[in-house]
Image: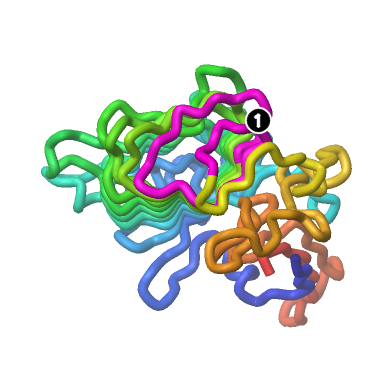
Amino acid sequence: MQLIPKILLLGLLCTGFSAQLQATIFRINNQTGTPDGSNGIYEQPLAAHNDAFTGDTLLFDGSPDAYNSFMVTKRLVIMGPGYFQDENPNTNIFSAQIGRITLSPDGSTSATGAAGSIVQGMDMGDAFPGEIIVNVNDVLIRKNRLNEVDINGSTNPAFRATGVVISQNFFAGQNEDHFGWSSFDVLQGIVVRNNIFEGKVEVPDFSQMHFFNNIFLNQQFDIQNLLGTVRNNVFFSTNATYNLSADSITHNISMGSGLPAGNSNILNANPGQIFVLNAGVNGSDGQYRLKANSIAQGAGFNGADIGPYGGVSPYVRYGYGEMPVIWQMSTAGVIDPGDLLQVSIKAVSEN
């Protein structure tokens, strides 16, 4: 994590939305914004969405109050400041809470409308129902805290959402009915990687999906007849009997004996041999980092680490993205007209 004292780009973001080469950033803040964005800041996302064009960004500020749910019908980047901000000693910002984001087509097929959108850094874990609904193709959902993702697996290929990537998210298990994964149709072309699942995980039979480098904390796990690969994952529960069958189940670690033996799967492991643990010290998501000399180090496919912090897209704590998030700003005070105002900005980003 890198603290950046002065960032010229962020000065542009603070003025509201700024034109870039081919896209515009629409800032959303339900504390200081106006309904129509007349002061450069929108109060709620729907108005900003309606004014945005394909390829634009909706940038949510952190807030103590949840934002209104909304439907997306154009290709956008939807970005918040991350989650678990209260656990990060380096920041004093809120997360951007929202109950539901629906990604939908604007025409007759799943290849239109919000197809190709990105949802990142939103906090939906405490806002009911805490879900993202995907009715379009080629969506990237990453670095969010949420309860579930519902993907349209319609038997009609024109409406079936494919090419969806679910990466580096924290799925909060508030209760048994809040699934980490939920859909009633067969899913196709879905990649699930580097996530932390607290809740139940359920996938329809004969779905075409791949699970890489996740950790499943709940003993309820129902994935059968999967047309895909289950690799480099950690199954944390010691007393679970997993309903799991797939084309390939390799290089996983289980704390019990519920996984198939062989294929480089490690059974009956001890969590203390793998993770740093201690959520009170290391955080809700940081506790699942590998400890020194962990048995998961290098034990994955092609020598990768097993678990959410391994592989090609390691989990990022707090859901931080590439764009820095301001958490403190100060000025030298009042100046005379024409003089330069010195502004100091502290921000945090992934690197």
Disc 1 target residue: 237
State which quarter of the image contains the N terminus.
bottom right
What residue is drawn where x is 43% and y is 57%? 77
Q: Quadrant of residue 155?
A: top left
230 vs 124, left or right, is: left
Magenta residues span 235-261
308 vs 150, left or right, is: right
Residue 10 vertical position relative to residue 103 in the rendered view, above or below: below
* 128 inside magenta stretch: no
Q: Nearer the viewer, residue 270 or 111?
A: 270
Question: Residue 2: x, y in percent?
Answer: 76, 69
Residue 257 vertical position relative to residue 330 in the rendered view, above or below: above
306 vs 284, left or right, is: left
Report if residue 69 is visible in the image.
Answer: no
Q: Nearer the viewer, residue 180 or 41?
A: 180
Residue 4 vertical position relative to residue 34 in the rendered view, above or below: below
User: How many discs appear?
Assistant: 1
Report if residue 312 is visible in the image.
Answer: yes
Within 10 Å of disc 1 (Cα), the crowding (few <14, some 14-19, many 20+) is some
* 256 inside magenta stretch: yes
What residue is drawn where x is 36% and y is 73%? 22
Label 1 is placed on what type of residue?
Answer: Ser
State which quarter of the image contains the C terminus.
bottom right
187 vs 256, left or right, is: left
Question: Residue 264: x, y in percent?
Answer: 56, 53
Q: Secondary structure at mark 1?
A: loop
What residue is drawn where x is 51% and y is 28%? 242
Question: Residue 234: x, y in percent?
Answer: 61, 44
Colour setup of the view: rainbow
Residue 332 vertical position relative to residue 216 in the rendered view, above or below: below
